[in-house]
Image: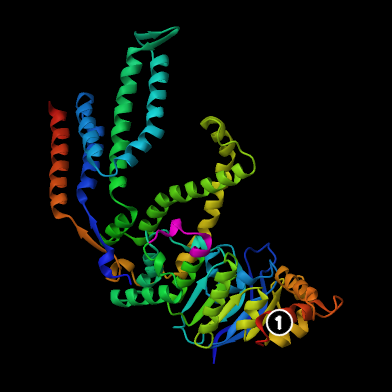
């Protein structure tokens, strides 16, 4: 027997404000200060309980991108030589530019990852609906996030099926990507085609009912807001904005 | 008392496509179980969507005639053939997934908890209550979708090929559930499984190319279009099973007799 107690969810707005502050700093702070912001953000992210999720995503997808940025900008930027490796000459200006972009990208990705790793989608959707957001908007948002997981799930099944048909899963990652790449387009198209069925299913479940869902107090989840986290978060965000504003005049 | 009336209803998904339903005239009575029978492409899914009042979602569709509910407050619940799409993924647990339409209905929280707990125990899936729907097997997902429909306590329960992903044990179990529900709720079920049909059907509507070619009680429909049934895989298997039985009819007997008798034999002569 499931009781209402099991659906009490705590939402801590501190996560949201830490992410907002870091993003604001990435855009408005000077490059010298962004190193400190990144250090602080990494510290906070390392101390959070879901740190492996944040860093796994970063290492897999963003770090290679940053390294490619260094190589391309370093090699092709016009400027004075800084590092010479064999026949390759990396330009100083290019490396500085790549550092700027890389820093910003790292802060953005880790701050967003920090938020999503610590607040689950279900809680976000309940929180948004509770705040009066349009439920259609919330649904589209959640489905966009869920799409990644659903596609990954489908891709895994296809991968297993391909392995059963002789795909060599022991070969290196590039070979495996080469095998799976042609499947991505039909996979995405299938997902889009399914969206019509999904719309019908939602209608069948009364999602588009006349009464507005967020006007009713019938949600089985109860969101408890952490007020202390919210206060600390707002102060942090205001300090960030104040520093950004002050930098304009110094 | 009629609960759903199809009057000269025709429907096409696009103007240049062949009609998926043609001139459907049908009166579905309260608490009756109507089985929609027919091969792939006959229009079973379209019929189910029309009965649920959900065909308006297709933008380029063309329709004529009406599907009337004599009482506007009649509530329908649909279990779609593609049940993967019917899981919303808006929720982290099966319990919340089943509660989703009840939240949309605006029911009070205690009522939602009672209904969901009841339906999960009725479907014998309480153990899945706190699991993530994404982690479940196909059969389990289908049970969740059926539980979600039942939790709404609909006046008309519409099921589009509900046995398609279930194992034999779950099939038998769902047949029992539907058998229990029979008489207390109107059921429309698009299904070709002979055993389920013989177990629960009050009326059969045989569809072919979007048209109802026969409608009536089980024996009426079997006598009129039974010969074509054997073309359906489920029935031909059923017929083959009977042919090989010691007391079977000769293999030259008409297919519908073989199928019908084999199904009867398997059910122990329930009908």
- Quarter of the view holding residue B170: bottom right
> Residue A187: x and y, percent?
55, 47
Of all residues, the one furthest to the right in this rendering is B252
> Residue B137: x and y, percent?
50, 59
Residue stretch rendered in magenta on the structure? B131-141
Instruction: Name the chain under label 1.
Output: B
B72 within the magenta span: no
* B252 lies left or right of A192: right
- Residue A118, above or below A35: below
What residue would you read off at disc 1?
A: B265
> Residue B39: x and y, percent?
70, 69
Q: Is residue A243 visible?
A: yes
- Residue B74, above or below A34: below
Image point (35%, 61%), residue name: A135
Task: Judge by depth and name the residue closer to the eye, B159 or B114.
Answer: B114
> Residue A195: x and y, percent?
50, 57
């Amino acid at each position: 027997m499931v009781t209402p107690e099991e659906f009490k969810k705590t939402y801590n707005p501190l996560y949201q404000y830490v992410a907002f502050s870091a993003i604001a700093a990435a855009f408005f702070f000077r490059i010298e200060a962004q190193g400190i912001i990144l250090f602080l953000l990494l510290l906070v992210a390392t101390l959070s309980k879901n740190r492996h999720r944040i860093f796994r995503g970063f290492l897999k997808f963003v770090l290679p991108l940053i390294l490619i940025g260094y190589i391309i900008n370093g090699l092709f930027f016009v400027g004075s030589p800084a590092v010479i490796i064999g026949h390759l000459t990396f330009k100083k200006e290019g490396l500085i530019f790549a550092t700027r972009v890389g820093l910003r990208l790292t802060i953005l990705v880790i701050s967003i990852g920090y938020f999503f790793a610590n607040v689950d989608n279900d809680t976000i959707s309940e929180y948004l609906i509770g705040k009066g957001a349009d439920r259609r908007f919330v649904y589209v948002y959640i489905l966009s996030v869920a799409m990644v997981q659903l596609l990954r799930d489908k891709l895994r099944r296809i991968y297993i099926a391909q392995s059963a048909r002789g795909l060599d899963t022991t070969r290196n990652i590039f070979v495996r990507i080469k095998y799976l790449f042609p499947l991505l387009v039909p996979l995405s198209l299938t997902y889009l085609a399914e969206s019509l069925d999904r719309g019908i299913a939602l209608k069948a479940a009364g999602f588009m009912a006349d009464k507005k869902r967020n006007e009713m107090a019938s949600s089985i989840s109860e969101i408890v807001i952490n007020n202390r986290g919210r206060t600390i978060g707002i102060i942090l965000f205001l300090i960030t904005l104040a520093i950004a504003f002050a930098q304009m005049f110094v | 008392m009629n609960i759903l009336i199809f009057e000269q209803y025709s429907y096409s998904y696009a103007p240049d496509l062949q009609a998926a339903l043609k001139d459907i005239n049908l009166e579905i009575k309260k608490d009756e179980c109507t089985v929609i029978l027919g091969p792939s492409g006959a229009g079973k899914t379209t019929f189910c969507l029309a009965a649920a009042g959900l065909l308006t979602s297709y933008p380029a569709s063309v329709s004529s005639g009406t599907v009337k509910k004599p009482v506007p407050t009649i509530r329908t619940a649909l279990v779609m053939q593609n049940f993967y799409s019917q899981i919303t993924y808006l929720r982290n647990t099966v319990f919340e997934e089943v509660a989703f339409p009840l939240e949309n209905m605006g029911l009070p929280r205690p009522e939602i908890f009672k209904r969901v707990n009841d339906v999960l125990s009725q479907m014998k899936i309480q153990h899945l209550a706190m699991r993530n729907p994404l982690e479940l097997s196909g059969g389990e997902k289908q049970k969740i979708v059926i539980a979600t429909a039942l939790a709404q306590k609909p006046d008309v329960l519409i099921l589009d090929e509900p046995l398609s992903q279930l194992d034999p044990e779950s099939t038998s179990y769902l047949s029992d559930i539907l058998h229990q529900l029979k008489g207390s709720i109107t059921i429309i079920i698009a299904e070709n499984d002979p055993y389920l049909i013989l177990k629960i059907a009050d009326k059969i509507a045989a569809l072919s190319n979007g048209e109802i070619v026969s409608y009536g009680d089980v024996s009426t429909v079997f006598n009129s279009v039974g010969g074509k049934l054997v073309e359906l895989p489920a029935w031909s298997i059923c017929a083959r099973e009977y042919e090989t039985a010691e007391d079977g009819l000769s293999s030259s007997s008409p297919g519908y007799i073989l199928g019908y008798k084999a199904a009867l034999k398997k059910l122990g002569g329930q009908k």
